[in-house]
Image (cartoon, rainbow, N blue to C red):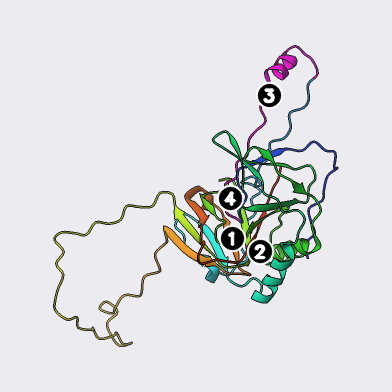
Amino acid sequence: MSSPLPPVAANASGPKVDVSAVEGGDSPVKTKGVKRTAAAASSSRSGGASKPKPKRARLTVGDDEATQVTCLDESYRVPLADGDCFYVPDLVDAETAQEWHDELVKLDEWYRPTLKVYGKDVVQSRKIAAFATDPALEVKYSGHPVKMSYSYPPLLRKIQDLVEARLGIKFNSVFANLYEDGSVYIGKHRDNRENRVIASLSLGAPRTFILTHTNPPPAPSPSPTTAVSSAPSVPSASASPNDDPATAAPAAAPSPLLYAHRTTLASGSLLVMQGATQQHWKHEVPREKRAVKTSRVSLTFRQLVF
């Protein structure tokens, strides 16, 4: 099994990442560089001592280092236009998924983060729990520090090892989301466009997941000159091996690429988004008050690097 990335000293001064929402594979994430204050700039110009500028934190590796998932069978691919997305409906069986869900909801790390909405602090209804292998990492959630844990519970470590082995890549963080029932949701958004791989494991209640292209082509208008025939259609004879290839029926065209996609994330399923998906697509888990009465845990595995 894969081992966690090596931690650095706990007292290291690490970068800060601003995470505006953290949903299973499905949350907007922004990274901000570090700005020098006027005092620091003045001190630098005058030759005075100043602290070294921290490294900028990113939620992905650079283009030259980007690791993509390449080991999944093409049958799992979701045919998105301008996207690179896979859906594995049964990474683990339903019974195992429910057992994991039931254990994870008991974690002590769950809490409701505070969000900044129109300048006011608002407590979010959806609970989160954040884990990372590097104690130098500091994460912000909508302007507020995230309660990050640097010691993985044994079950969470086991699950991350399984996901890493299945996808052939490593992660050093996981953001867990608890949807206690169908009233808890996350609106349409996209994650940081620099993200290369986001893998989200669903455990518990199935939930609707919607993908929407940010710039779909206009729908074709019906031609006013096109006449609709009222005559019954006559099936044409199928081509035989002896037919002239020039007159044989053409092969079926491949399925068109999608500009909108709606599906249900089953318990035990794994959704992977990578490449340019975040540049061209938004996603959401809509509110389903009447249809969903039980809880769902979403585990979103990411690559947080400096």
Q: Is residue 116 placed above or below 125 in the rendered structure?
A: above
Q: Secondary structure at mark 3?
A: loop
Q: Label 4 neighbourhood size at 10 Å, few (<14), some (14-19), many (20+)?
A: many
Q: Residue at x 65, y 46 (%)?
A: 59
Q: Amino acid at mark 3?
A: Arg
Mark 1 / mark 2, whichever is N-terminal: 2
Q: Is residue 122 visible?
A: yes
Q: In this orientation, which residue lies closer to the viewer: 115 or 197?
A: 115
Query: Quarter of the image holding residue 242?
Result: bottom left
Q: In this orientation, which residue lies closer to the viewer: 274 or 28?
A: 28
State yes or no: discs 1 and 2 in contact (Cβ < 8 Å).
yes
Q: Label 1 neighbourhood size at 10 Å, few (<14), some (14-19), many (20+)?
A: many
State yes or no: discs 1 and 3 in contact (Cβ < 8 Å).
no
- Magenta residues, start to end: 25-49
Residue 36 shows which numbered tag? Answer: 3
Mark 3 / mark 2, whichever is N-terminal: 3
Q: Horizontal and vertical percent for residue 217?
A: 35, 52
Q: Secondary structure at mark 1?
A: strand
Name the residue beneath numbered marker 1.
Answer: 272
Q: On the rendered image, what quadrant is the C terminus found in?
A: top right
Marks 1/2: CA–CA distance: 9 Å
Residue 27 shows which numbered tag? Answer: 4
Marks 3/2: CA–CA distance: 40 Å
Q: Amino acid at mark 2?
A: Leu
Q: Amino acid at mark 4?
A: Ser
Q: Secondary structure at mark 2?
A: helix
Mark 1 / mark 4, whichever is N-terminal: 4
Membership of 46 in magenta stretch: yes
Name the residue beneath numbered marker 2.
Answer: 167
